[in-house]
Amino acid sequence: MSEARPRPSPEKLVLPIVGAVSFVHLLNDLIQAILPAIYPMLKIQYALSFTQLGLITLIFQVTASLLQPAVGFYTDKYPKPALLPLGMGFTLLGLLLLAVVNSFPLLLLASALIGLGSSTFHPEASRVARMASGGRFGLAQSCFQVGGNAGSALGPLLAALIIIPRGQGSIAWFCLFAIVGIMVLLRVSRWVVSSQAAGSARKNANIDSGLSKQQIRRALSVLALLVLSKYVYMACLSNYYTFYLIEHFQVSIAHSQLFLFLFLAAVAVGTVIGGPVGDRIGRKQVIWVSILGAAPLTLLLPYANLYWTAVLTVLIGLVLSSAFSAIIVFAQELVPSKIGMISGIFYGLMFGISGIAAAGLGALADATSIITMFKFCAWLPLLGILAIFLPKMRQVNPGK
């Protein structure tokens, strides 16, 4: 018996709005991706250890994660579309500071401001994407998520082309992306205020998932563990893949950034596939195949040569990335009355896990080696077996 899926609501997909929040998600995550992309430059310029690099990521990710559930909980009761451009304003301030700082503590402050911008942006933007979905929740969430993944892929590439050759001051050019994002989000916030979709979203929030509180808590716990396995491994690749390539294969910094771009581009493609497939065959099946299916590839990766390392990381990105859209929509359907809070919790969990993992993995790499750290992380996708404990969702109609 396949998982029952919600039927589309009568409202139509508002593609320009979904596209707008996806585009700004691209800009937001492109800016975020600058940080790990310039780690090799910062490490040399400020004589930083891997542990200090992990602390930069920790400050950013924790700042980006802690406020998200609170923002989502508040906006579930009191929608605040003005938070969208405000969040990008914090990101702009963080970028300006990052371009001119000259000490490690100020690097941490700049990272915190960029993280604060993300924590303000994600819950409300995710809600707007769902609001404009016309009931095609997986498709809308996938489009929203792929914007972020595309930005994460472009960030290292642009950093290699613009920042690495010219130095820290050239980070200021990326403020243009933040300004464009603020302008787009001002228009999105006006649409939210004037659209009838907001009223329909509040009406649909009264739908019950048909599960007991115990079943909901257990399912959310399983989803949290799956996010843990996925994002610890993603933190390994996103933050330390370049160092792995440099140490293991003696490639240049610029060459390693191109490999990172290939991996992150594959993540974007996998995200596009995951949402619509989840709408068609069910979220649980996508989650199961995505996380557990990546395990054989991750276990092979530490023993591959340079060519097969590139191939395997592309395949890992494609397979593993298809899960997150399915996970977050599954969680939203478990608690449909708390869309903002659930979005904030899972986006916050994603950022928090990534930050803690980055610091812990950095310390592990300092204590052992980058290669040993990659071998340790290779086992994490096996936690995908926990998807067997996710419940079958009864069919609901969000339009009534």
Image: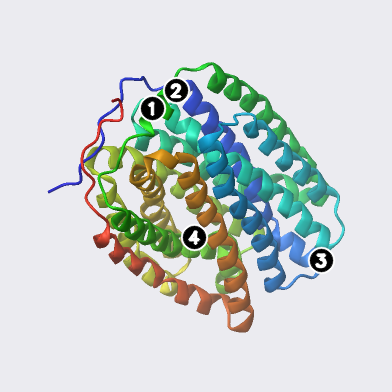
Q: Are marks 3 and 2 in contact (CB under 8 Å)?
A: no
Q: The disc labelled 4 sits on which kind of residue?
A: Met
- On the question of residue 267 being in view, the answer is yes
The kind of secondary structure element at disc 1 is helix
Cα distance, mark 1 to mark 4? 37 Å
- Which residue has dot 1 on it? 203
Q: The disc labelled 1 sits on which kind of residue?
A: Lys
Q: 289 or 308: nearer the eye?
A: 289
- First along the sequence among labels 3 and 2: 3
Q: How many marks?
A: 4
The kind of secondary structure element at disc 2 is helix
State the mark number for residue 46.
Answer: 3
Cα distance, mark 4 to mark 2? 37 Å
Who's the residue at 55% across and 70% down the image? 249
Picture layout, residue 189 above or below residue 37: above
- First along the sequence among labels 3 and 1: 3
Q: Are marks 1 and 2 in contact (CB under 8 Å)?
A: yes
State the mark number for residue 199.
Answer: 2
Give x and y (percent) for residue 255: 60, 57
- First along the sequence among labels 4 and 2: 2
- In the picture, measured across the screen, residue 270 lies left or right of residue 351, that is left
- Classify mark 4: residues with Cα within 10 Å, few (<14), some (14-19) or many (20+): many
The kind of secondary structure element at disc 3 is helix
- Which residue has dot 4 on it? 234
Give x and y (percent) for residue 133: 40, 28
- First along the sequence among labels 4 and 3: 3
